[in-house]
């Protein structure tokens, strides 16, 4: 019996530690297909200001102030930030002022940092020891800019899911990076009606749904994969009896499309707090969740045969120790 092993993780948000653990997991589990879902973009940046008078570098990382002078200390500071999902950059006071005051310059600057981070990750992957016939797929998410899309399209290692991708002789992958509206007004959001129309177009481009794997960034509504703290109009967490109040925030359109087409497997992310699995009809839906800020890899390992899903399990971390400086 031929079995295809798929490793799926999501929402790494700039964490180099998660990326290294993902690459290690590809080798440890000897997977045929590795899929990293968005979001790839970091949520934080770290300006490291160069003081030319003292030839030193100052930064505040995770509440601690640093003043470093040697190249080794500077490299360690940068790596510490990257392992925490924070993108460091060396700057001066003049440029920092421009980044702070010019919103358009700020947006482009941050997007370029994210692209550089992703390209660095890909170079690490090219020098890794996993089997080179492994299909390596990276799917952007709602926080990822079009610049990241273009960088992935151009790379010769990464399979970018413009159209469907053949996973093996029987299964095809389709993907969808848009999400239903959020309080954060992120880059790739759509009203539910429009989201459903676009997602149905994706499904209508393939057939034989018993052998379709769908990577859909937004989890389905009220699936247990979409539970997050409820926010008020000022984006503050709502509390009930002193505890955070949680609610379902997934996409109704995504759920309706899964119910209609019944693919074999759906892969989700987006809601970090809500890892797990569920069945919607005969479709297995998984969300590994994310703890990128702790450097923890959370991923699903799924084994597919032509007839069925043979096995699936959540895997966390794969033997790489967190570097401490």
Image: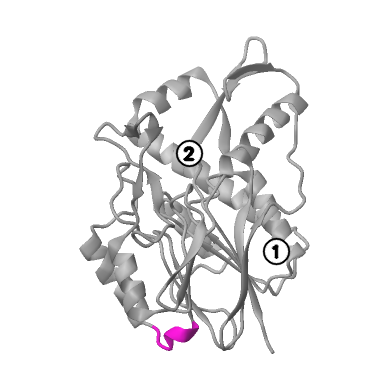
The answer to whether residue 209 is magenta is yes
Residue at position x 77%, y 51% from top?
319
Q: CA distance from mark 1 to mark 2?
A: 25 Å
Secondary structure under the numbered disc 1 in the rendered image = helix
Where in the figure is residue 147, as x and y percent of width and height? Answer: 44, 52
Q: Nearer the viewer, residue 186 or 239?
A: 239
For the image shown, how many numbered marks are present on the structure?
A: 2
Tell me if residue 165 comes above or below residue 121 in the rendering. Answer: below
Secondary structure under the numbered disc 2 in the rendered image = loop
Q: Quadrant of the C terminus?
A: top right
Residue 87, image quadrant: top right
Q: Nearer the viewer, residue 206 or 284?
A: 284
Kindly tell me whether residue 172 is visible in this rendering.
Answer: yes
Residue hosting label 1: 26
Tell me if residue 325 comes above or below residue 315 in the rendering. Answer: above
Q: Could you classify mark 2 by the number of other residues whose Cα lies within 10 Å: few (under 14), some (14-19), or many (20 or more)?
A: some
Precedes in sequence: disc 1 or disc 2:
1
Q: Which segment did they paint magenta?
A: 206-211
Where in the figure is residue 24, as x and y percent of width and height? Answer: 73, 57
Where in the figure is residue 124, as x and y percent of width and height? Answer: 70, 53
Residue at position x 24%, y 35% from top?
233
Q: Which mark is residue 210?
A: none
Q: Could you classify mark 1 by the number of other residues whose Cα lies within 10 Å: few (under 14), some (14-19), or many (20 or more)?
A: many
Residue 57 located left or right of residue 127: left
The answer to whether residue 292 is magenta is no
Residue placed furthest toward the front: 241
Colour logic = one colour
Residue at position x 58%, y 25% from top?
62
Residue hosting label 2: 43
Where in the figure is residue 166, as x and y percent of width and height? Answer: 54, 81
Tell me if residue 44 comes above or below residue 127 in the rendering. Answer: above
């Amino acid at each position: 019996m031929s079995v295809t092993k798929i490793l799926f993780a999501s929402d790494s948000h700039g964490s180099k530690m998660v990326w290294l653990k993902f690459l290690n997991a590809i080798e440890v589990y000897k997977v045929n297909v590795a899929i990293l879902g968005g979001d790839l973009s970091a949520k934080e940046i770290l300006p490291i200001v160069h003081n030319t008078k003292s030839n030193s570098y100052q930064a505040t990382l995770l509440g601690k102030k640093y003043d470093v002078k040697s190249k080794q200390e500077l490299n360690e500071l940068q790596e510490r930030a990257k392992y925490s999902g924070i993108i460091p950059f060396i700057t001066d006071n003049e440029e920092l002022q421009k980044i702070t005051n010019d919103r358009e310059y700020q947006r482009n600057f941050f997007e370029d940092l994210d692209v550089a981070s992703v390209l660095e990750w890909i170079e690490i992957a090219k020098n890794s020891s996993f089997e080179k016939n492994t299909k390596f797929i990276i799917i952007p998410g709602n926080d990822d800019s079009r610049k990241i899309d273009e960088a992935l399209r151009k790379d010769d290692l990464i399979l970018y899911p413009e159209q469907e991708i053949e996973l093996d002789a029987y299964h095809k992958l389709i993907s969808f990076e848009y999400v239903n509206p959020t309080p954060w007004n992120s880059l790739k959001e759509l009203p539910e009606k429009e989201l459903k129309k676009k997602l149905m177009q994706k499904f209508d481009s393939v057939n034989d749904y018993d052998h379709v794997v769908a990577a859909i960034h937004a989890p389905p509504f009220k699936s247990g994969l979409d539970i997050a703290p409820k926010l008020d109009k000022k984006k503050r967490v709502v509390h009930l009896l002193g505890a955070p109040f949680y609610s379902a925030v997934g996409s109704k359109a995504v759920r309706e499309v899964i119910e209609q087409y019944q693919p074999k497997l759906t892969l989700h992310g987006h809601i970090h707090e809500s890892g797990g699995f569920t069945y919607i009809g005969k479709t297995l839906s998984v969300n590994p969740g994310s703890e990128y800020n702790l450097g923890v890899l959370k991923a699903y390992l799924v084994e597919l045969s032509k007839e069925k899903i043979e096995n699936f399990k959540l895997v966390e971390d794969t033997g790489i120790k967190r570097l401490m400086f």
